[in-house]
Image: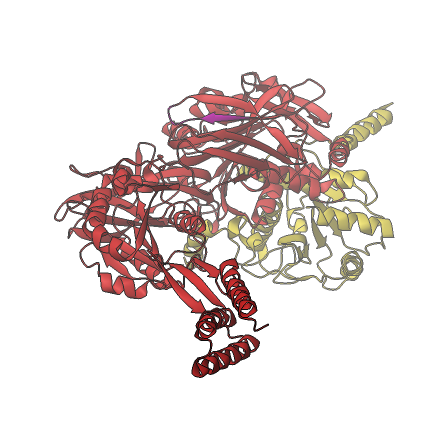
Chain colours: A yellow, B red
Amino acid sequence: MRKLLILLQLIFLLSATMISHAQQHNRFVFTQLKYDGNWDPYPETWQDILAFLATTTSLDCEPRRRVITAGDNQLFSSPFLVILGNESFPELTSDERQRIRRFLTNGGMIFAENSSGIRSGDFDASFRREISKIFPEKKLSKLPSTHPIYRSFYLLRGVGGRRLTNNYIEGIDLAGRTILVYSQNDIIGAWAKDRFGNYLWDCSPGGEGQRFEAQKLSQNIIMHSVCGTYKSDAVHQPYIEQKLRR
Amino acid sequence: MEYTTLQFLKIDWLLLAAFVIAAASAVLLWRLRKMPLFAALRFPVIFFLLVTASAPVLVRFRAERKPAVAVVVDVSPSMALTKRIESAVAFISKNEAALNASVELKYYGFAASSSEVKQFSSLLKANFGPATDINSALWGVRRENSGRLSGVILITDGNHNAGALKDNWLNGLDAPVFTVAVNSGEMIKDIAINSVKVSDFAFKNVPLDITVGVAASGLAGRSTSVRLKDGTNVLAAKPLNIVSDNDSQEITLRFTPALNGNFAYQLEAEPLQGEITATNNYKNLSLNVIRDKLRVLFLSGSPSFEYAFLRHMLKNDPMVELVSFVILRNPENIMLVTDDQSSLIPFPSSELFSRDLHSFDLLLLDNFSYRKLSLNPEYFNNIKDWVTVKGGSLLMNAGPNSFSTGGWNFTAVGDILPADAPPAEDSFKEGFFRPRVVAPGHFLVSLTDGRKENEAAWKSVPELEFSQELRPKQGAEVILENPRDGSAVLSVWDKGKGRAAALGVNTTWKWALQSGTLNVYNAFWKNIIRYLTRSGKADEWQVYFDRPEYFAGQEYAVRFRRPFESDTQKLRLTVTEPSGSKSTSPLKKSGEKEWSFSGRFRESGTHVFDLNSDSAGMARTEYRFETAVSAATSREEANLNNDAQFLRDIAADTGGLYFDEYNFSLPDFYDKLKKIKQKSAVEKSPIGVSGWCLAILAGLLVFEWFLRRKKGMW
């Protein structure tokens, strides 16, 4: 009986983490792609990320994570999609590639991350392969330090992450919009905590400062998805340049 | 005068030979002195034979006619006002006797029409209309005289105003024109606006230069001002200091149009005391003001997908210059870094809502909370004035900080919104729905070309989620509604000179993300923006008048054309005259997308045309434009000075001469007259073969035969 009750509670909690109906109004939804592989290396960090957003920004967030697959119609229910992994990213079907391409072309944005923190690891190679099939005409390229993503909320002079694998993040632009942001620094991993609330991983080599940079960068990425190139507008430049000079 | 002469036309050699034989026999007989009587008879026979042989003709001539010269006198109002007609009559009186000695004068008067007059003195009271048509006058005179004129004396001030003159308009006139400029009796005191140089169109919010040509006479040393007015409002003004009695200046006025559309303005040189007329102190100016770019101010109370999608669309619209602000942090949010580590900037409320607001065309309020920013309530009055007086456009969309839930319904901004929400928190409706089109044929719901295709597009748009229950206000037009509860999803109305819209959803981004293409989303928002700002296709009625300029009393015909399909079949035109009286008439459909109307301008001044239609039982103003009508006499009074150069040109082009009333030279005049070889009327009477000659000849021959028989010579 006791085991049954625990099972029921687990089922309830599990269902609470997912949105069975894609109702969200105009709120930001943390949507994550589920695939055949290790798609969810950090099952609970999204809560901390959303809590951080709610505390520090005016962004109205849906309090629950949405998990979808590439073949799911709910792929088009929210324009922001997170893809994480530290092992091989599976080969997508032609239909799935077309759907993801349409998602991105019609206004969606993907934040993808090689959670292994190892440059050119399994996830990196397989993910790049799939992206090159989705957008054969495009290539992942470094986002310059002047990219709006580095100033969408915080003014970032560099990147952070659990591992400083690269001192940059990459992306693909389409029609004046960055539709894909890709990191190998395990930015999301910098948020991971144990059940006591302690950070699971050290951030190397920069320590807690590097972790904070990762947290700010993840917030900037999300803010960029809901603000676009807002901070590139001319009205902001004098202020930003003045602050950067300090 | 007539005279007669005898001419011998030919010599018949046979008859001449007969004469020689007869003459020789007469001489022989006379020498023989035998038959002097016979010899005596021979002489008359010889005589008549001679006459017959030479074919004599009695010719009666008429004297040659004098060259015909038409004296064509301008009796238009400009000549009358400046008393130049009196001067013209005096000129004719002075020169008539000398002219009549050598030429045949015919008198004509002209203004808008022309006619021959018997007495030139009758020109003083002639009335041939309110315009000056030199072209028709000259060609009418030529036609009446079948091209037999040796010259034309044209007495006019040269201010032709009855239509443009083609190049080489005098070709084929076939008579030299002697132009005579007569002066007015005394120095004319007058200021006239005689030219306006301005671009064909102006850009909204971009300064425009208007160069006004002013001619002043008889007012040396006096000052006035030249102004650009919109009704009673002075938009620009500059002083005019008159230097000499024949002064001509160009004054450049600069003003910045604040609204786009077709407008009628007035240019004015403030009349001075003693001017002969004030009509020519005014000139109407029609201006088409268009946008260089639409300036959109997009304010969002929080970042969101709706903001991101709309911002991206606006940023990529080449017709839009976007300025946007998003409130990224509320007062209750915690800031974990120092100011120099965040990209946040202060929200410039004072600059936006006071100083810079007028420079925008459209204000989008996206879930924007004034409470959290503690905005000065005076800003709301600024926004209201900017919409109602300056013609700005406002749109508010749904959100927790919008409409009543945002406290807007108790502000001046709420007053100008076409819909409001119940004050309760439960004004938000959950659930998915596809909006229902309430105003088919309205530009705002035109997602694609073709009525059927458009209906299909609306039936297949992705469902929206959540709406704020909005109730349209009296006079608002509902375009889209939520079929689940009938609440207005999109409502619009004209508010003063501007427009406002209320959108009860904030998930239109789904139309972009979930459709096959971005077309539906882009079309929907582009329509809203262009409709609210009265620009682009939304306002793209094309208006064609049958004349470039109108005067009071003239009839007009106007056509309206719209390039896109519409359900609108019945259109009405309401014309508001300067006096304020209105008349509404149905338009006649003259083509698939064209309507026409004709009427008469009874008054001078600015006339406002409103093109109205009925859609879904509601009257709607489709298009509004203005046109200026000048006073009937303004054509004539526009320029009261002699156009000496024009008169010189007429003379030069026709081989004539230009004179003024003091230096008219008869010898030069005669010298230049066209010499027409006139065929005299000749009457010929042949004598040689006339019956009398032949009878006399026969009688003489018979008498001689009788004598010979009596004498026994036969």
The outermost residue toward the left is B221
Quadrant location of residue A81?
top right
B657 lies left or right of A197: left
The residue at the point 38 percent across, 50 percent down is B198
The residue at the point 52 percent across, 22 percent down is B584
- In this rendering, the count of numbered labels is 0
Specify whether residue B547 is painted magenta: no
- Residue range corresponding to the magenta coloring: B573-579
A66 lies left or right of B73: right
Give above or below for A14 relative to B337: above
- Nearer to me, B59 or B322: B59
B75 lies left or right of B456: left
- Nearer to me, B606 or B321: B606
B297 lies left or right of B486: left
Q: Can residue A174 be seen in this view?
A: yes
Q: Can residue A195 be seen in this view?
A: no
Give above or below for B224 relative to A170: above
Q: Where is residue B73 shown, x and y percent of the image?
A: 30, 46
Give above or below for B350 relative to B28: above
